Image (spheres, rainbow, N blue to C red):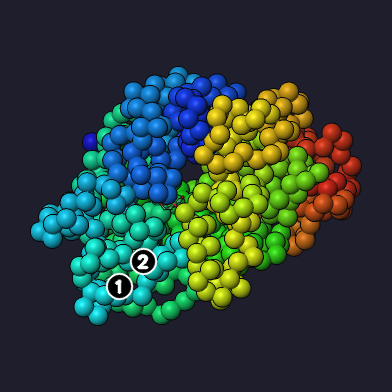
Amino acid sequence: MTNKRTNWYKNAVVYQIYPRSFCDGNNDGLGDIPGIISKLDYLEQLGVNCVWLSPIYDSPQKDNGYDIANYRDIYPPFGTLDDFKLMLSGMHERGIKLIMDLVVNHTSDQHPWFQAAIKDKNSPYRDYYIIRKGKKNGKKPPNNWTGFFGERAWSRIGDTEDWYLRLFTKEQPDLNWENPKVREEIIDILRYWLDMGVDGFRCDVITLISKKQDFKDRFPSLVLVGKDAYVNGPRLHEYLHLLYEKAFKDYDCMTVGESVLCSLEDTIKLVKPEREELDMIFNFSHTDVDNFFGVKYLHRKFSLNRLRKRLSKYQFGLANGKGWNSLFIENHDQRRSVGRFGTDDGDLRKVSAKMIGTTYFLLSGTPFIYQGQEIGMTNASFDKVEDYQDVELHNMVAMTKKSWFYRLLIGKHLFSVSRDNARTPMQWNDSKYAGFSKVKPWLKVNDNKKYINVEEAKRDSDSIFHYYQKLIELRKKYPVTIDGEYKLIHQNNKNVYSYVRENKNSKLIVISNFKNKTVKNPAANDVKDFALILSNYESNEEKTLQPYETRVYYMENKL
Ligand code: ISL
């Protein structure tokens, strides 16, 4: 079959929906597919043309759906397959594509494959997972690897000598991609959803699927012991190319992979078009700007220089056809962007949100907006640990209780970096449960729903929501936002991030003040003869920039 792909992803603006927290259609406290259907007009109004839906598959929800027990059905509290099909056609009618979350590094421990694997040593499903004999007659794990939520990476199968690898919770056993049957199963799952009409996948922790097969102890470290054996493993590219050959290339779909600790060289290998693997990846180097070693608990003071360097590295590194960038500042694992990256979630929240939004949105790549980002939702800030639901946070709290070392090192920042910060229910209006539900939601609503909510944002002509509409319009109206080359100007300025996008017909200049005070505008002379097409302030001084001021200038080349 010939290649069906048209690379529409380059023109996409993607909106991420975290279904538990988006909209509760049947008032049981949990978001669901009928809730999403009721908000499709809202998405159309915002102007996005693609949705990434976090997992909606049947699941025991130990990690909010990133633990799948049936890849071909919907988690009943979220709805049915018929609801899903209705949602999909509703999106397509509105010109919105849908990409699904694909979680295939691991399954749920309740998946029939895993249940069969642990019940019978001779089951063919045993080899679907990574099962090894433990040390000390099976009493100790096979090696010293640790996983992502702070624990060791192995769990014992009952009181047998055998252990299974699980890089996340003990309810998320890792699949054994070495087994060709596993690969066939995954390809079938991909084709099942693509045949139903979905438009692509966001591939969860896809860079972990291949593991070095020695399973030896690795040098101890603070986090992710064994990462050299399971991150970007030896057969990763072979597996991804296989998925491309056997599924992706037969459909006009897009793929974005979630990476872990991915260098520029690794990134190019994953996204270079001729290699036929993925269209783009989420790289976290810029969201790790405020921590040390990619460990979010190790807080580091924000620096604009570091942010600019990290973003620019991938902007330059993937230019000239080497690949395509994904652009994002929030998702369901990250804390909110207002109050982060040097910005303010208090009095200057609105200008802050617009400034950071403009800065990332007009870089080269496909922008992703995480639900609530478009109204400037802020972090959860609950007082009590019981109010947090995330398995990662509870694991980390347990670790700090066990070890004074961890308490000292990470204790202080546990809540401020919790994944629940971005998972609080979407704030639709100022009612008791923010219009998300009529009953108490699964996670507490943020008190600031009184003034941060969709209804209010629609009323206010100066709102963040209306500003995002304009940003999306810019991408539709000015091709340079999509194909323009990225260039830095005033790259050593400590206060202001300014860059140019340029194609053969036109030029766009973005200037953003990352400080909460008025500063000198270093790019004042660069924009002579340009038209100001967007700003977060009503009036602008030529020589100075107000707190968190951002401006977008445009000029067409004279013929
Ligand atoms: O969230 C993180 C740290 O706080 C990350 O390390 C995260 O665990 C990593 O990026 C992988 O995330 C993805 O896979 C996980 C799931 O829990 C996350 O929600 C998902 O985005 C396991 O499937």
Q: x, y (%) of residue 151?
A: 42, 66
Q: x, y (%) of residue 394?
A: 50, 57
Q: x, y (%) of residue 406?
A: 55, 72
Which of the 4 image quarters holds residue 385? bottom right
Residue located at (73% from left, 55% from top): 342
Q: Along the line of sight, which residue is nearer the eye, 443 or 123? A: 443
Residue named by callout 2: 153
Is the CB atom of the residue marked by disc 2 within 8 angstroms of ligand 1's nearest atom? no
Residue named by callout 1: 141
Image quarter of the N terminus: top left
Report helix, strand or loop for mark 2: loop
Q: Determine if residue 426 is in view.
A: yes
Q: Is residue 529 left or right of residue 384?
A: right
Q: What's the distance in space between the residues labelled 1 and 2, CA to CA?
A: 9 Å
Residue located at (43% from left, 79% from top): 220
- First along the sequence among labels 1 and 2: 1
Is the CB atom of the residue marked by disc 1 within 8 angstroms of ligand 1's nearest atom? no
Report helix, strand or loop for mark 1: loop
Q: Amino acid at mark 1?
A: Pro
Packing grade of label 1 (10 A; few <14, some 14-19, many >=20) is many
Q: Determine if residue 471 is in view.
A: no
Number of numbered markers: 2
Q: Is residue 222 left or right of residue 474?
A: left
Q: Along the line of sight, which residue is nearer the eye, 254 or 170? A: 170
CB atoms of marks 1 and 2 within 8 Å = yes
Q: Amino acid at mark 2?
A: Ala
Residue 296 vertical position relative to residue 104 in the rendered view, above or below: below
Q: x, y (%) of residue 543?
A: 89, 48
Q: Is residue 94 left or right of residue 351?
A: left
Residue located at (85% from left, 46% from top): 546
